């Protein structure tokens, strides 16, 4: 069977996963505004763990081998730190702006691959970094021109930090997706994130209000669906093939921000997002030239 139809299906499934995740972002933004990012992520993880755990048990799932468990823990820690920072930031900036800043993740992943996997940094990656950095500066200039509050600036910085941690989780995702089925990936993502946040419950935790139950259940279900879709896709296609689908999140975020929160997208955010995307495209494109276009690290 040709690999092309499988790759196309993986791309479409990943696109659906990104769309679903962005809808979940809107629910989580409201929960983060109402009760803080910590509580929103904690209770979403708790509900997700219960739902995934029940289905995992019904299907006769087994505890993973230590080799696979290490992947689950590593990615869970990176993803958990990322989502708390991201939703804290998203509660303070427009959705489209916050999502645009996370587009740095594929570019950062190239440098992390060089640092941890010994891969070579191409000249195109350096050029792409410069272009993408210009995009971040354009978005920042928009905040300055709009006389943004300190909270908005901190929110943007949190989204950038979240993109660095998310890039680390991308390094592990393909290995994780090839070693475990989508349900196991979703289960351990929720378990690890919940376990990370649990120690702070006595100081930071608050029980969700009854009015939030529906949003929490919806966020947990959408998160599970998104994680399973992306795990299925990454098990069948290379990360470099699927990375561009991440950029569709900007359109969904802009639409969700407008419909749910009445947010408008500034020209600075649009221009900055385009520069970041362009930088990533330049960085990840294949090079036909030889070693003279590569810089060892």
Image (spheres, grey):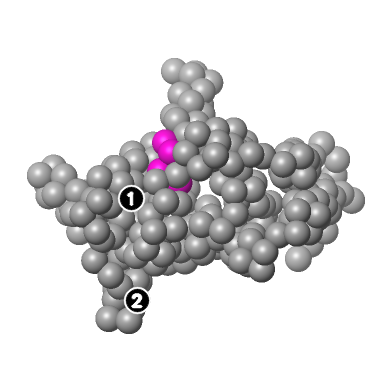
User: Where residue 187 appears, x then y in whole percent?
Assistant: 27, 53
The circle on residue 185 is 1
Q: Is residue 277 among the parts visible in the rendering?
A: no
Residue 33 lies left or right of residue 287; in this view the side is: left
Mark 1 or 2 closer to N-term? 1
Counting every numbered tag in the picture gives 2
Q: Main structural element of the magenta stretch: helix, strand or loop?
A: helix
Quadrant of the image occupied by residue 79: bottom left
User: Where residue 261 appears, x then y in whole percent?
Assistant: 51, 42
Task: From this view, report whether residue 193 is shown above or below residue 132.
Answer: below
Residue found 25% across the figure and 45% down from its top? 214
User: Where residue 36 appears, x then y in whole percent?
Assistant: 41, 64
Residue found 42% across the figure and 51% down from its top? 30
Quadrant of the image occupied by residue 197: bottom left
Task: From this view, report whether residue 19 is shown above or below residue 41.
Answer: above
Residue found 85% across the figure and 40% down from its top? 289
Range drawn in magenta: 20-25
Verify CB contact (< 8 Å) between mark 1 and mark 2: no
Residue 83 on the magenta segment: no
Residue found 65% across the figure and 52% down from its top? 101
Q: Is residue 196 among the parts visible in the rendering?
A: yes
Q: Residues within 10 Å of mark 1 (few under 14, many from 20)?
A: many
Nearer the camera: disc 1 or disc 2 = 2
The circle on residue 62 is none
Q: Secondary structure at mark 2?
A: helix
Residue under label 2: 204
Residue 258 lies left or right of residue 285; in this view the side is: left
C-alpha separation, residue under disc 1 versus residue under disc 2: 27 Å
Q: Nearer the viewer, residue 130 or 6?
A: 130
């Amino acid at each position: 069977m040709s690999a092309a139809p499988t790759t196309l299906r993986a791309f479409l499934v990943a696109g659906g996963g990104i769309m679903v995740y962005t809808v979940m972002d809107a629910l989580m933004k409201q929960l983060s505004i109402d009760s803080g990012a910590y509580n929103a992520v904690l209770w979403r993880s708790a509900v997700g763990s219960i739902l995934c755990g029940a289905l995992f048990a019904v299907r006769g799932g087994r505890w993973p081998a230590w080799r696979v468990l290490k992947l689950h823990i590593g990615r869970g820690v990176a993803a958990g730190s990322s989502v708390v920072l991201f939703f804290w930031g998203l509660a303070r900036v427009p959705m489209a702006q916050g999502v645009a800043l996370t587009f740095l993740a594929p570019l950062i992943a190239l440098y992390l691959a060089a640092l941890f996997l010994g891969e070579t940094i191409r000249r195109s990656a350096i050029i792409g970094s410069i272009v993408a950095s210009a995009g971040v500066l354009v978005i920042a200039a928009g905040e300055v021109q709009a006389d943004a509050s300190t909270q908005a600036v901190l929110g943007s910085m949190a989204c950038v930090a979240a993109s660095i941690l998310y890039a680390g989780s991308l390094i592990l995702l393909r290995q994780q997706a090839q070693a475990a089925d989508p349900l196991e990936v979703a289960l351990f993502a929720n378990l690890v994130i919940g376990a990370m946040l649990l120690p702070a419950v006595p100081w930071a935790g608050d029980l969700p209000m009854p009015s939030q139950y529906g949003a929490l259940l919806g966020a947990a279900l959408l998160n599970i669906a998104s994680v399973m879709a992306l795990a299925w896709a990454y098990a069948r296609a290379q990360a470099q093939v699927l990375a561009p689908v991440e950029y569709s999140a900007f359109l969904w975020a802009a639409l969700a921000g407008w419909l749910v929160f009445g947010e408008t997208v500034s020209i600075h955010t649009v221009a900055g997002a385009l520069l970041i995307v362009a930088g990533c495209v330049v960085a990840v494109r294949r090079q036909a030239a030889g070693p003279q276009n590569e810089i060892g690290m």
